Amino acid sequence: MTTEPSPDTLPGLLDQARQDYRALAGLGLALDLTRGKPAPEQLDLSDPLLSLPGGQHTSADGTDVRNYGGLQGLPELREIFAEVLQVPVAQLLAAGNSSLELMHDCLVHALLSVIPGAESRWVDQERIAFLCPVPGYDRHFALCERFGIDMIPVPMTADGPDMETVERLVADDPTVKGIWCVPKYSNPDGVCYSDATVARLAAMSTAAPDFRIFWDNAYAAHHLTDEPVEIADLLAACAEAGNPDRAFVFGSTSKITAAGAGVAFFGSSPANVQWLLGNNAKRSIGPDKINQLRHVLFLRDADGVRAHMERQRALLQPKFEAVARILDAKLGGTGLATWTSPKGGYFVTLEVPDGCAKEVVRRAAEAGIVLTPAGATHPYGDDPRDAVIRIAPSYPGLAELEQAIAGLAVCVRLVGYEQRAR
């Protein structure tokens, strides 16, 4: 139940918040909640990778992984992740370390070569725009900004992007070429796309014949509860709707095994796969197949991925529970904040009163608690409401995390009560 302070109680609440903030600033903290990095303990789970592949240097089909070639990646690794990413093995590529690199490359290739279904290169067209569900992932927005792609914010709902807005924008404007989607445990709000949303994305009419859904399934296996969320198969839905080339599916092992030495994946239609392979052949003679073999030997199969992710969950779940517990204890009932309770992924979204997010982040930084900049969850770093703060609980130890969230709550109370007192 939300308790709005009365004119009589507000001065006392503000005075207490100021005292608490002075005490917080006096602790000399140096805590960082900026990025969703795996903690060292999570990385330790994959230490056996460092001794693999041992003396083995041939893949299941006899390929010598020490040599050139194999642009599509090891078949046995693609078999492991085909189920996880909902992509047929033959339509899945296993590449280098980062799925962000693959997204970058797909944009570059679409700009500089003719993507299937396009009439010309994107760079030769007067305007290119992408739909950006908000709050969203800042690195997606940075790619668009880097290449001069206009960004159109679309509100998120509990089922994914507001599809009425999406359908209207893509139907009317041929310069809208794509949409960014993190469909499962979205960054940063934890939303999972409903089956209806997936079906509408697959079947909607688009003015651009070369429209693409950049389906960044970064958290496909990253569950935090006993009830893993399953989402509909976008690639199959697009094929059934007569739009087989619409989806680009991305994923990686970066938050599964070693973030600095993972394997990234790209899945799509046969035409899109051949398009990407043809372009990639001009920039690489093949991925790191030794690293791919390491992952095959370590993970073994899809069940091995699930078992490994249960060990990851055992480390992450207490941190997310701590965030929820402290926010509820310190801010529950104040009317100063709401927050998400994700069932998976790496982030919690905290919403504060309009006009307060930047000031909360500034006060936290002055007290030694560094957060992702306010506005990072929106295109061009501009949150029109100045209300959204992304919390990344994964990296700090549990004691440090608890200290940081309690300190953040102090900053929210200080800034919120200051605003109300004006």
Image (cartoon, rainbow, N blue to C red):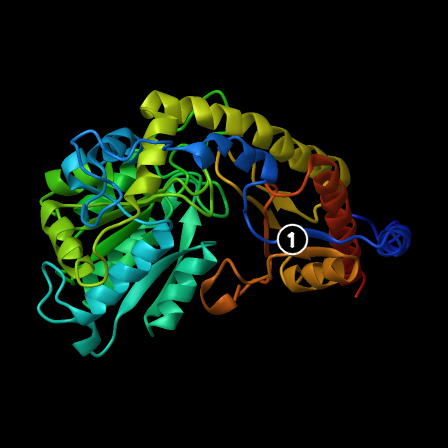
**Residue 66 appears left or right of 322:** left
Q: Amino acid at mark 1?
A: Val
Taking the spot 14% from the left edge, 62% from the top edge, the residue there is: 115
Q: Quadrant of residue 278?
A: bottom left
How many numbered circles does the render carry? Answer: 1
Residue 342 visible? The answer is: yes
Which quadrant does the C terminus fall into? Answer: bottom right
Q: Quadrant of the N terminus?
A: top right
- Badge 1: residue crowd in 10 Å (few <14, some 14–19, many ≥20): many
Residue occupying the far front of the picture: 55
Residue 80 position in % (x across, y down) = 28, 29
Residue 35 image point, x, y percent: 56, 51
Position of residue 205 relative to residue 224, above or below, is below
Q: Residue at x 47, y 59 (%)?
A: 138
* The one of 54 and 114 positioned closer to us in this rendering: 54
Viewer-side residue, 151 vs 257: 257
Rendering quarter of residue 55 = top left
Vertical placement of 322 versus 268: above or below?
above
- Say which residue label 1 marks: 352
**Residue 39 point in image, percent of width and height:** 59, 40
The relative height of residue 82 versus residue 156 in the rendered view (above or below) is above
